[in-house]
Structure formats: structure tokens, C-alpha cells
Image: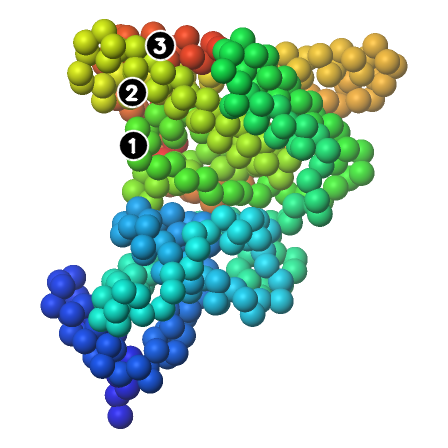
Amino acid sequence: MESVIDRACAAALYSDGDAGLDTGASLLAADPSADEDLHRRGQEFVRRAWTRGWQPADVVRTVRRELDEDGAALVSALITGETAGYARLPPRWTDQLAAMPAPAPRNRPDRFTYASALLELYRLLLRLPVVEPVGPVPGTAADAPHRPPAHGEPRMLTRIRALLAKAEATGFPEEAEALTTKAQELMARHSIDEALLAARTHSADTPGAVRIGVDAPYESAKAVLLDSVASANRCRAVWNSDLGFTTVVGFEPDLEAVELLFTSLLVQGTAAMTKAEAGQRAGGRKRTKTFRQSFLMAYAQRLGSRLAADTERVTAAAGSEAGAEGRDGDAGALLPVLAARDVAVTDTAEQMFPRTTTTRLRGATDAEGWNHGTAAADRARMGGGGPEIRR
């Protein structure tokens, strides 16, 4: 005999209208004995998402984007329940789980409303597409294709995190500039040290990948900024505009640097944009959407060239230092080692995304926004037509 859960799901999950949701929610609201089976069904949909390449942060971000914050709290409860029984979590999942919203309590504000919201969530989970995996699925073999990060955070990354936090907090542009520049220099040096160490020890490490959310508004400018940060730190970025994230491919130390720097630069850029916009409003300007878009696009473009220049400078200095200190092996090996890692990253990205395209984005249309964004990028220390980005 068909269960209440089966009848409710059949009514609600395979149609687009509200009538099916109302029918399914009514069935569930009238039968409290079905509550546990209803949540077990939701955890099953979560497990399916893992096998399709999704991770907890991806699911929460998509639910928040497609539904609302209440939906994110509902899926958080399902993910929390599902992952509680895992003996081992894949890399990065612990941090993702800790960052989820508080799980929603059951049957609030009433049974019908709660069941309706849950079924709407299940409808979304059921239709999640397959995406490129960026790590192992829980319960798979320990020798999954992507290496877990080393236990604990390296001291260098702790210093970088502290520098960027100070850059975000200061109210003095010159200080933020100096702090962010120092952070990028440390990132570049850390990447070089890791590459040389891997070469000397004949490490079998291979590139991995991480997904980073690129949220509206002005997501194209944010994607360009992330692409600039990734390129400067020896990674490759591919933007999925439909699903609202960019996949960054690279070696583990570089991926960590990209996440840290992108988040910080976005905070700094948004603060600078808000301040510049306030000045525009004070001058009598009312429409600001084009100003913001142009500001962030200029900010991203200018930072790209600055970041690349910083990395080149640090790389050249590292080779010179090795030669001056008599470490001719390191001096001579540095460029071939970095080139080999670049090839490995490119090959991995092409294997993951064999059908990417390069899209030319719309150029800036607001001169004031462009000028203010360029100035803000200069202060952050990290041109004309629309930039290109891999999608």
C-alpha cells in the first residue's frame, strides 16, 4: 500500500504548480506519524546531491538563492542530520558545516506551512543538476582524487589571514594598501616554497579544486575579480553563471590563498564602492546601478594587473635570492618547477571542464564609477573594454 510520504511526494515533487504542494502538505499535516519518514526522505535527497558533485556550502547557497533564508535553514537541518552519522568528512566539509545557518525547528509555525516549505525544498533538491566534483563523496575510498589539506593551518596562512583582517578593518587607505600588498607577497612566496619543497621530495601531490560562491548583484564583476585573484596565484577559474559559483583549480596552498584574498578584496571593494557612492549621492546623483557595476569592474580589472605584477616580482626575487645564497639548484629549478605546476593545473582544469567557453562581458558604461573603481584598486594594491572570463 502506498505510504503517505509517497503520495505527498508524488503530488508535490513532480509538478511546478502550487496545487501539488498544497495537496502534499495537507496529507503530511494530517498525519504526524509520517514526520520521521518525511525527514529521512529529505536526507536521501541530500545524499543524492553529494553523488552529483555538490557539497554542503553549494546546496545551502543554491537554496538561499532559489528560495529564501527559511529554505536555507530547512536544508541546514537536513544536512546536519545526514552528516551526523559520517565517520569521516571530506576536506573542507567541517568548515562548511560550521558556517551553515541555524537548522530550522520542525513544524513551525504550523504543520501545513512547514510541510509545504519542506516539499518545495525537496522539489529543488530533486532537480539539482550534476556538477563537476571538487572532492570525494563521504564514505568513498581514502585515496580519493583530491588530497585533503594538511592538519591545522600553516603559520604563513595565519599571518596572511591576520594581515587581510587588518586591511579590511582599517579606515586608512594607505594602511590597507600596505597590508594587502604584504599579504599577496606572502602568498606568492608561500606558493614558491611549497612548489620547491614538492619538487625536492618528489611529492605526488596533484591539483585539486574548490567552489566559491559568486553572488548577485554585480556577479560578472565579482567573477572577474575572482578570476584575477586565481590567475595571479597560479590557479584557473571557471565561472558557472547559472548556478552562481566559480570553480577554482590549483594546488592546495594556492587554493587557500585564493579563497582568503578574494574574500578580503571583495570586502574592501564593497566598502570603497559604498563610500564613493555616498559621495555621488551627496552631489545630487540618483541612479547608482551603473556606477556600482562600473566601479566593481574597474576594481577587478585593475587589481588583476597589480596582482600579476606582485607575483612576478616575488618570483624574480626568489630566484635571485637563491642564486645569491649559493643555492643554485633552487635558482635553476624554480622556473621549470613553477611551469610544470602551471601545466598540471591547466591539464586538470581542461579535464574537469572540456567544453568551457570564453565570454566577453559588457564593458563599463559609467566613467565616474570606472575612475573611482580604478582608484580603489590602486589603494587596495592588490584595461578599457569588457574583460574575458572562462565559463
Is the residue marked by circle 1 packed among few (<14), some (14-19), or many (20+) residues within 10 Å? few
Query: Mark 1 = which residue?
Result: 217
What secondary structure is found at the residue carrying circle 3?
A: helix
Label 2 is placed on what type of residue? Answer: Arg
Is the residue marked by circle 2 packed among few (<14), some (14-19), or many (20+) residues within 10 Å? many
| 124 left or right of 336 in image | left
Residue name at image x 76 percent, y 11 percent: 320
Q: Where is residue 238 in the image (x, y as percent from the top left)?
A: 42, 36
Q: Are marks 1 and 2 in contact (CB under 8 Å)?
A: yes
Q: Position of residue 324 (x, y in %)?
A: 83, 10
Query: Mark 3 = which residue?
Result: 372
Query: Mark 2 = which residue?
Result: 292
Label 1 is placed on what type of residue? Answer: Pro
| 79 left or right of 244 in image | right
| 151 left or right of 368 in image | right
Residue name at image x 53 percent, y 51 percent: 98
What secondary structure is found at the residue carrying circle 2?
A: helix
